[in-house]
């Protein structure tokens, strides 16, 4: 196989690997706080829980609990998109758009209604493309609020695009 035919699959594989292993943006780690009636979930589907009684650090921590939060699907795709703006020579601009979609499965295991507060981190230059829209957006994260009755299982779809 000629060297040029090997170059294209190699570049595609390198691009895909870069996307798969892209690090989340570094964000300051404020001390999380527990709020009555809310279940706080981070982008990795970890649940904010109180510190253990004998723990050295008595602050709440995020821990995995697959009964309360489970990532049902996590997909990344890309496609070409043509923008209406043109280059100086009159040609339309085409660029690759990367779309990342994640679906959370959230279950209220308490005896009272709760609000799930899901914080999804955003890569630099990305924007949220979801329905429902987040309750709050910062340059590095989006916060979604989903209400659930006792025993109810709800789905939250979160999409982001470059």
Image (cartoon, grey):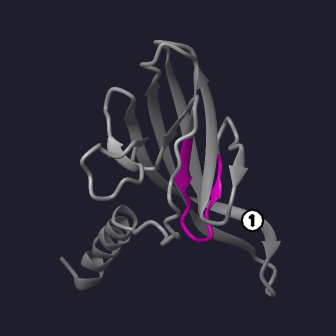
Mark 1 lies on a secondary structure that is strand
Which residues fall within the magenta stretch? 118-129
Location of the C terminus (image quadrant): bottom right
Judge whether residue 123 is colored magenta. Answer: yes
Q: Nearer the viewer, residue 28 or 26?
A: 28
Q: Residue at x 33, y 58 (%)?
A: 57
Q: Residue at x 65, y 69 (%)?
A: 94
* Residue 37, percent from left and from top: 58, 28
Q: Residue at x 62, y 47 (%)?
A: 143
**Would you place residue 128 above or below residue 90 in this image?**
above
Residue placed under numbered mark 1 in the picture: 83
* Residue 18, percent from left and from top: 36, 71
- Say which quarter of the image contains residue 11: bottom left
**Would you place residue 76 above or below residue 70 in this image?**
below
Kindly give the residue lying farthest to the bottom in the view shown.
88
- Say which quarter of the image contains residue 8: bottom left
Is residue 93 toward the left or the right of residue 72 in the image?
right
Q: Nearer the viewer, residue 33 or 45?
A: 33
* Residue 27, percent from left and from top: 52, 69
């Amino acid at each position: 196989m000629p060297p040029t035919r090997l170059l294209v699959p190699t570049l595609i594989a390198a691009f895909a690997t870069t996307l798969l292993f892209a690090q989340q943006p570094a964000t300051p780690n404020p001390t999380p706080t527990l709020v009555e009636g809310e279940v706080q979930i981070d982008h990795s589907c970890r649940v904010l829980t109180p510190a253990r009684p004998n723990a050295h650090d008595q602050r709440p921590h995020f821990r995995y609990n697959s009964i309360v939060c489970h990532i049902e699907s996590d997909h990344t795709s890309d496609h070409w998109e043509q923008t209406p703006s043109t280059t100086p020579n009159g040609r339309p601009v085409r660029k690759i758009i990367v779309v990342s979609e994640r679906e959370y499965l959230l279950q209220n295991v308490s005896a009272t209604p709760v609000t799930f507060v899901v914080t999804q981190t955003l890569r630099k230059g990305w924007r949220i493309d979801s329905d429902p829209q987040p309750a709050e957006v910062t340059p590095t994260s989006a916060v979604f609020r989903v209400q659930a009755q006792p025993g109810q299982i709800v789905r939250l779809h979160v999409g982001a695009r470059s």
